[in-house]
Image (cartoon, rainbow, N blue to C red):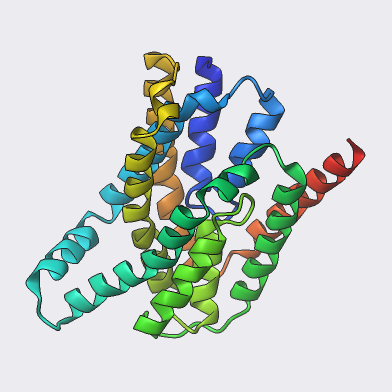
Amino acid sequence: MSIIEAIILGIIQGLTEFLPVSSSGHLELAKFIMGDDSVPKESMLMTVVLHFATALSTVVIFRKDILEIIKGLFQFKWNDEFKFSLKIVLSMIPAAIVGIVFNDQIEAFFSGNILLVGCMLILTAFLLLFADRAKNTNQSVGFGHSIIIGISQAIAILPGISRSGATISTSVLLGIDREKAARFSFLMVVPLIFGKMAKDVMSDEFAASSVSSAALIIGFIFAFLAGLVACKWMIALVKKAKLTYFAIYCSVIGVAAIIYSLNQ
């Protein structure tokens, strides 16, 4: 993998992990554009590094919230901190189950299926449009909400469905305050990212990775910096109900991907 490719993938991962345009879908499109062999399956190490970079950017921005979650889990008192920590744990369960039970089927989706990516990007666009038109409230995330949002996150495993777009849209449509919805969406994914990283590190594909140290470092830096910018930007956009712009973008990219796929 070249340095240019590492920069491109780093920026794509950093921006699309938080912006509601599907990081998995854009990475699939990027791999297809650069050629199937330019970002081969043996680059598992790069995938882990890029995800670690975006997870770290989330930790930096929400460091106070994450400390409260950790403290809440070990206080064992039925207070607001413990309740919020429990909601985060509940939200992780659906995606964790899907990731473990359907691991082989999920991997099959990440094989340059441009038609699937296009269709799922259009689905993401509709979710964003509906969420942008929902009324804002001051409601917080409840226990039932956390499970429903978790199911939304599990469905977003499909390439082309934006994880942040799906979870934030679901939260807003459930009547949850926009800023609280964005905060919950970004916090609920951190444990899953680290869990997925641990699983990948122990895999045979990780051991077979052959990406240069320079490419890894450059990819990490660009993904981390792009993640910091995108995370803060996304929170501001959700508060101002500006998701329609991303819905238009997802629609355009989705239609283009479908047309290209059908013409091949």
The answer, for residue 246, to whether it is visible in the render is yes
The answer, for residue 142, to whether it is visible in the render is no
Q: Residue 21 vs residue 140: left or right?
A: right
Q: Residue 209 vs residue 264: left or right?
A: left
Q: 237 above or below 208?
A: below
Q: Nearer the viewer, residue 129 or 88?
A: 88
Q: Residue 47 vs residue 57: left or right?
A: right
Q: 212 above or below 123?
A: above
Residue 255 drawn at (x, y percent): 81, 51
Residue at x 69% of width, y 55% of height: 121
Q: 65 above or below 107?
A: below
Q: Nearer the viewer, residue 244 or 87?
A: 87
Occupied quadrant, residue 150: bottom left
Q: Nearer the viewer, residue 205 or 179?
A: 205
Q: Residue 177 vs residue 108: left or right?
A: left
Residue 116 drawn at (x, y percent): 73, 50
Occupied quadrant, residue 217: top left
Residue at x 59% of width, y 49% of height: 105
Q: Nearer the viewer, residue 258 or 42?
A: 42
Residue at x 60% of width, y 54% of height: 158
Q: 260 above or below 91?
A: above
Which quadrant, please, contains the C terminus?
Answer: top right
Residue at x 43% of width, y 61% of height: 97
Residue 127 drawn at (x, y percent): 64, 69
